């Protein structure tokens, strides 16, 4: 693909920059910069979502017919890059990037009418009910059972690591509807209302003190047949479509490159012996190496976006970008902790770390965030399929091993 920006792309970039300068409140920028966890809290994420929705720029991952922007891959890239440079809050992936495109692709007209616009307005928040105790990497072994009873299913089981279940109105859930066929063939994709008796949410607090994930218990919970996406038994195919979007539907490089810029800026003022850390040859070498890897990732992501624009499915290369982006994320966060010396070791577990009530840092605010961010980013090489699982997919589907 042609990597040079056209005159129209440059004009679009200027339009995005002007919009961000005018419409992205400082409070939301501070919220994003003060968030050590992977997902931002709804107080800042939803506000940004509403601003983008009002502008018509929210559903840029979606087909135009479902409310998408119709942007070219280069425009999508420009938008994500400018948002990263401006410290815009990251958008909730669960509704916008995961279940939204699934409903747009596999849903009936009635399902599209009922669910899609409520995702965009933020009226409905979603969570992902895939993993179970004992069924993570080996997802096809999942045991949550859905038994048909007239026009509904009765669902029993437990889901774990369910991000933001404590905020969610709905769960998209993989459940076993037929235990007598091979594991992949007996799974269906159900939409479950979280606000009903029988749904119990138990928080899981992460190492850094954040409440992002939960265990969810489903006891005789109801899922209407009209809220099943696709046919009964088609859940595995839909789950794979969704996972490919989760791993590769967006660009990781812009945010990684913006964070590397930020780190370089911090190192330029961080005292080190008689000078500053940026003068340290070992530190500079490690920073440069990470930048080269992030730039290589950026090129790969642009190539994938170009393929998506031609109507091809994301495919196994999303495993490659997920693998590289996750490892880079962790290496950047590790170098950031090192940048601050002893101040980088402080671990504050109160939340939020933005706003007037946030605790005073030792040293500066970025130093206070370094360790919680580092601890949270351990999750990158696990969620959405661990590094080992991505390597298995690449070995099988790309290398033919
Ligand atoms: C922060 C966070 C948020 C998450 N959010 C969600 C969510 O919202 N919804 C949801 O459904 N799930 C979510 N997950 C769960 C995530 O998808 C699983 O943790 C992941 O798929 C791994 O499954 P597991 O934890 O059961 O580990 P296991 O599958 O038990 O794996 C344990 C270890 O064994 C390795 N391993 C397993 N199988 C193989 C193999 N075949 N070859 C080589 N190595 C292997 C793994 O790489 C890993 O190191 C989240 C996880 C985290 C950490």
Image: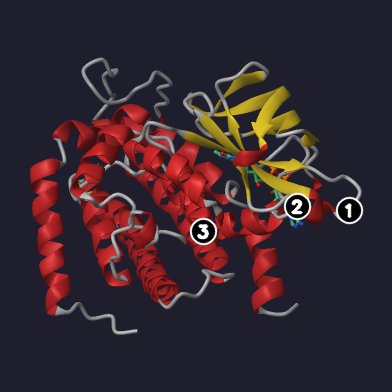
Residue plotted at (79% across, 43% down): 177
Residue 329 x/y as whole percent: 44, 52
Residue 116 in view of the camera = yes
Residue 362 x/y as whole percent: 29, 24
- Circle number at residue 233: 2
Residue plotted at (84% across, 46% down): 178
Quarter-of-image position of residue 227: top right
Residue 89 x/y as whole percent: 29, 41
Quarter in which the C terminus is drawn: bottom right
> How far separated are the C-alphas under marks 2 and 1?
10 Å
Contact check, label 2 and label 3, Cβ < 8 Å: no
Report the residue marked by disc 3: 105
Q: Is residue 66 above or below residue 211?
A: below
2 or 1: tag closer to the N-terminus: 1
Residue 129 in view of the camera = no
3 or 1: tag closer to the N-terminus: 3
Contact check, label 2 and label 1, Cβ < 8 Å: yes
């Amino acid at each position: 693909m042609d990597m040079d920006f056209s005159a129209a792309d440059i004009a679009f970039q200027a339009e995005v920059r002007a919009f961000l300068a005018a419409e992205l409140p400082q409070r939301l920028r501070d919220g994003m910069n003060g968030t050590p966890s992977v997902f931002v809290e709804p107080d800042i994420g939803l506000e940004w979502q509403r601003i983008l929705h009002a502008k018509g720029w929210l559903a840029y991952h979606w087909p135009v017919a479902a409310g998408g922007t119709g942007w070219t891959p280069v425009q999508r890239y420009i938008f994500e890059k400018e948002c990263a440079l401006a410290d815009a809050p990251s958008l909730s992936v669960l509704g916008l990037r995961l279940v939204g495109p699934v409903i747009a692709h596999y849903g009936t007209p009635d399902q599209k009418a009922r669910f899609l616009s409520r995702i965009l307005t933020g009226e409905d928040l979603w969570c992902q009910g895939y993993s179970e105790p004992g069924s993570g990497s080996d997802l096809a072994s999942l045991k949550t059972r859905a038994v048909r009873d007239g026009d509904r299913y009765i669902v029993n089981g437990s889901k774990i690591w369910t991000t933001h279940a404590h905020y969610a109105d709905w769960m998209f859930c993989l459940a076993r509807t037929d235990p007598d066929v091979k594991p992949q063939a007996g799974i269906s994709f159900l939409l479950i209302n979280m606000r009903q008796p029988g749904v119990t949410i138990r928080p899981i607090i992460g190492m850094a003190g954040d409440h992002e994930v939960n265990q969810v218990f489903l006891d005789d919970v109801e899922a209407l047949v009209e809220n099943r996406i696709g046919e009964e038994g088609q859940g595995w195919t839909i789950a794979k479509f969704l996972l490919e979007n989760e791993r590769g539907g967006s660009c990781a490089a812009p945010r990684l490159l913006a964070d590397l810029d930020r780190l370089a800026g911090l190192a330029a003022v961080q005292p080190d012996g008689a000078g500053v850390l940026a003068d340290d040859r070992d530190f500079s070498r490690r920073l440069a190496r990470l930048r080269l890897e992030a730039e290589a990732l950026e090129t790969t992501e642009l190539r994938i976006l170009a393929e998506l624009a031609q109507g091809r499915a994301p495919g196994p290369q999303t495993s490659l970008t997920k693998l590289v982006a996750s490892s880079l994320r962790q290496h950047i966060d590790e170098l950031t902790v090192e940048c601050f010396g002893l101040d980088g070791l402080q671990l504050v577990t109160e939340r939020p770390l933005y706003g007037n009530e946030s605790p005073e840092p030792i040293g500066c605010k970025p130093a206070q965030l370094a360790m919680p961010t580092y601890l949270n980013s351990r999750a990158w090489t696990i969620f959405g399929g661990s590094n080992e699982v991505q390597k298995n997919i690449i070995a099988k589907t790309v290398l033919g091993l």
